[in-house]
Image: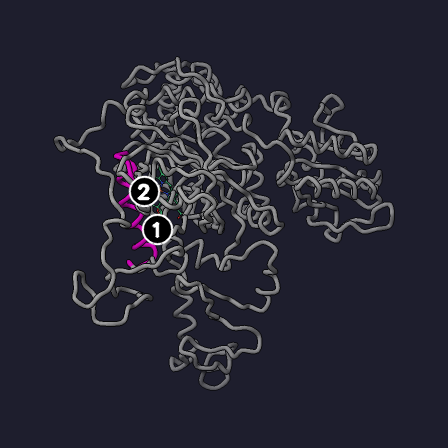
Amino acid sequence: MARKIGEDKGAKSAAREFETKTGAGGELHQIAGSSGDVLTTQQGVPVADDQNSLRVGERGPTLLEDFHFREKIFHFDHERIPERVVHARGFGVHGTFTLNESLEEFTSAKVLTEVGAKTPMFVRFSTVVGNKGSFDLARDVRGFAAKFYTKEGNWDIVAKNIPVFFIQDAIKFPDLVHAAKQTPDRGFPQAQTAHDNFWDFITLTPESMHMIMWTMSDRAIPRSFRFMEGFGVHSFRLINAEGKGTFVKFHFKPKQGLQSVLWNEALKINGADPDFHRRDLWDAIDLGNPPEWDLGVQIFDDDFAEAFEFDVLDATKIIPEEQIPVRRIGSFVLDGQVDNFFAETEQVAFCTQNVVPGIGFSNDPLLQGRNFSYLDTQLKRLGSPNFTHIPINQPRGCPVHNFQQDGHMAMNNPKGRVNYEPNSWGGPRESPDRGYRHFAAGEAGPKLQIRSPSFNDHYSQARQFFISQTPIEQKHIGDALVFELSKCERIDIRQRMVAHLRNIDETLATVVANGLGLPKLPDPAPAAATPRTDLPPSDALSIVKNGPESFAGRKLGILISDGAPAALVKELTKEIKRLGAVYEIIAPKTAGALLDDGTIAEAKQKIDGGPSVLYDAVALILSAEGAAQLSMDKAAKDFVSDAHAHCKFIAYVDDALPLIQRAGLLESDMDEGFVRLEGADDVEPFLALCGQVRLWDREFKVDLDAA
Ligand code: HDD
């Protein structure tokens, strides 16, 4: 069952009271028991010895007769299920959606019309390419799949943090995924696209160019799941009570704002804490600071779709928010951790085909293909068509009645003799009034295996995305392309990508060509439709322009030593809490440090385990002796030099200056991002400054690689 904030999980797990939810009613069923209960086999037989298998004599062979031993090993051998073919590494949480504005004019769906109604949700965040055990900060798209347990059945928006996709037709999905994942001969690289196969496929697939701009941007290295947008990508249909259809695109807008990390930082976070994102979300919920998103919709009719310069059925295109504003109609909070990772996060099954009355599909060929793939994959992964009987997948807001029966692991088995419809015995019947009605789209035409020419423009929106970025974000896109392409061994692949970039932005193409050391710019790639240069920039596409407004929800790392000024440490920690932010104390020893007033400040991290990449900003509150000692410590020096290189705000006391110098920073490096803390009054202005996320201008001084 979902654990809400404030409950004490520690005591529960200590007693090893594992509970799982059974049935839509939600009653709890103990499956392991608590201390005092007797350990049993799966058949309920009490176990006398769980330490030693049955053997002949003291040192003789083990006996097959030992059914407890055999059952235990047999079950263990079958613990794993196939990991998802994509999005294998994920992290799920429970939440609640509340509707604030009715869309009754457009849809009959109760979840979108009953203002004030609360709908339980389950959300699974994920990376795409890496295996289950890979690291969180891969440069990758993030999945943001949401299941709404509505009164009319489960509705899934299987979204991600980027609003477009690499391909236009689902038939290319296996090729895309094969090219992106480990190569079949050597089985590496893991969780990254910086290799020949990926870029080979991409450069031979011009429709991917818009999405490539997004994946090479900082969107692909988010600071946290909490600071990401979510997009349903496709045009869907809303269908109202009269059967009228209107197009809709779904958006999740984080109330926390948008924020990402730097690539160099991401590389180091992966080493310091491969679970950085999942830990962040777990901790935020644990500390009573659950993240929230608005549910937004872009609604447009067939006339707009006709007139729009791109095809609304093409998943490689957005509709700029300037053209169709995002209406925020409700919000959801994610505040419940799972009780059991396998039962919930691993077994949850999302399907794009899961819609409820009033919501339907468009003819987007990617969406149409997805509607087959998700259902199919659940059978493979969960092993039975009865995966809907698993508690996390069961509808919660409504009953389930049908005559589907039997199969592996059938849990909901009706009594009585009737298992067909129509029948003379009674039982559930279809309902023309309440039942799902597909949108009556007027389709006619010859069967063709073609791509519509209206899908032909592959570069114009890629350019629009690029010119919508701030200079620092543009620099990061250039750096990312150089990094990824420099890992490709084949020069023709690198050249082919630069040829595409010439259709997007000449400066970017030149920067990347220089970064790769190409002797000359290749000719622009042939384009099926002339790339447009007249699309205006859109502020909604930049992370920096949509960042957090304060330090709330973020983390300060406070490096302390014995003899550090207690008054400052206390003021910092008090003010951080007041802001709704968090902090961690880092010290030379795990036990913490003895402050100048004789109190002990406990440390969360020893300096070696708490590098500054784990924090949004840092403070160096040291005594002169502490600074002298840490000046000899590589981890402490990296703490400071990385915080500087990653454009973080750094507060310091004068006694910490020797460490700053030994970290290689000159007085001239100490720009306006360094804040001297002379007394408690300096704390508030420092934290206000941290609200700006980073001092981006600094990066042009510390990292000029590809610029
Ligand atoms: Fe997909 C998983 C999102 C295209 C086939 N996809 C999966 C998940 C997300 C997305 C978030 C993880 C769900 C979870 O957490 O369990 N996928 C997308 C988006 C796409 C997209 C936003 C394009 C707009 N996907 C896509 C296509 C196909 C698939 C075109 C196949 C034709 N996706 C799958 C899958 C997965 C999956 C193989 C793997 C595990 C699963 O479904 O449950 O069926």
- Asked if residue 406 lies left or right of residue 260, the reply is left
- Majority secondary structure of the magenta segment? helix
Q: Quadrant of residue 380?
A: bottom left
Looking at the image, in which quadrant does ligand 1 appear? top left
Residue type for callout 2: Gly
Q: Which residue is mark 1?
A: 152
Q: Residue at x 51, y 73 (%)?
A: 33
Check mark 1 vs ligand 1: CB closer than 8 Å? yes or no: no
**Residue type, label 1:** Glu
315 to 337, vertically: above or below? above
> Which mark is on residue 358?
2
Can residue 122 be seen here? The reply is: no
Element marked by disc 1: loop
Residue 688 disc label: none
Q: Are the residues tagged 2 and 1 within 8 Å (C-beta)? A: yes
Of 364 and 131, nearer the camera is 364
The image shows residue 474 at horizontal and vertical percentages of 50, 22
Q: Which residues are magenta?
A: 360-385
Quadrant in which the C terminus is drawn: top right
Q: Earlier in the sequence, mark 2 or mark 1?
A: 1
Q: CA distance from mark 2 to mark 1?
A: 10 Å
Disc 2 secondary structure class: loop
